[in-house]
Amino acid sequence: MRVDVVTIFPEFFGPLDVSLLGKARERGLVDLRVHDLRERTDDVHRSVDDAPFGGGPGMVMKPEPWYAALQAVVDGGGPAPRPRVVVPTPSGRLLTQALVEELAAEPWLAIACGRYEGIDRRVVDAWADDEVSLGDYVLAGGEVAALVLVEAVTRLLPGVVGNAESVADDSHTTGLLEGPVYTRPASYDGRDVPAVLLSGDHGAIARWRRDEALRRTATLRPDLLMRARLDARDLAALAGLDLPFPLPPPAVAD
Ligand code: SAM
């Protein structure tokens, strides 16, 4: 996969060399390129922002450098005629694992990092395929959102995470939150690992993990539970939790 990030703070992207992502870059699994928006300015101050039409506080990112920067990305060539262009914004569609999976199937992404009051709307209208929000809060710029997008997407690429099964079991991938995990020692600080995990009974362990995922999801994110694919056994396990809301009908016949 190829990912181009356009930003006024290229130095924000040092973490792309670290850990799994750094190794994936070294191994050529992902080609990440960071571009400085200011290189696409033509005034002595390299200015990328101007006052908003209509007045009001703050500054807006000017269209000209953005058009030039995104055109340069396209003209530089890549694994498709053009990248899928993602603009992080708090007024975008919420980033979910389903959208991450969709983006991970693309050969080429470009991420446009806004600052100030955001990017002139004409840039977004002309170039963006997706406007994506990390959540219902406001960051100072799109760089952290771009890092989140790059990390969430690239860890799904074949070969990036050593054990593909560990990705398949993750929270949100199954539609549920993942339950608790433990490692050695079996007893620590007066707290014991649940006996079933030491039993060697893989069927019982799988059932326990599913029940814990159901319990955690029902407690912390009942909204997810309402959309999850639950079979009759899941519903029976949930019925035992005495939840303060009605359970959905089974999504999958048992
Ligand atoms: N005036 C904008 C609004 O109210 O929608 C907020 C601009 S914010 C201060 C500056 C930049 O931070 C945005 O252009 C976007 O790139 C990024 N940003 C802020 N919050 C975000 C969020 N929740 N998700 C994704 N990007 C965000």
Image (tube, grey):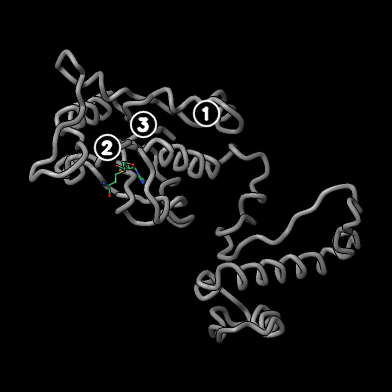
Crowd tier of the residue under label 3, counting other residues whose Cα lies within 10 Å: few below 14, some 14–19, many 20 or above: many
- Label 3: which residue? 5
Element at label 3: strand
Along the viewing direction, whichever of 50 and 234 lies nearer the viewer: 50
Identity, as a three-letter code, of the amino acid under mark 1: Pro
Q: Is residue 126 left or right of residue 138?
A: left
Kindly identify which numbered label has been placed on residue 116.
2
Residue 237: image x %, image y %?
Answer: 70, 80
Element at label 1: helix
Name which residue lies at 36% across and 39% down.
Answer: 140
Give the quadrant of residue 225.
Answer: bottom right
Camera-side mark, 1 or 2 = 2
- Label 1: which residue? 15
Crowd tier of the residue under label 2, counting other residues whose Cα lies within 10 Å: few below 14, some 14–19, many 20 or above: some
Identity, as a three-letter code, of the amino acid under mark 3: Val
* The C terminus lies in quadrant: bottom right
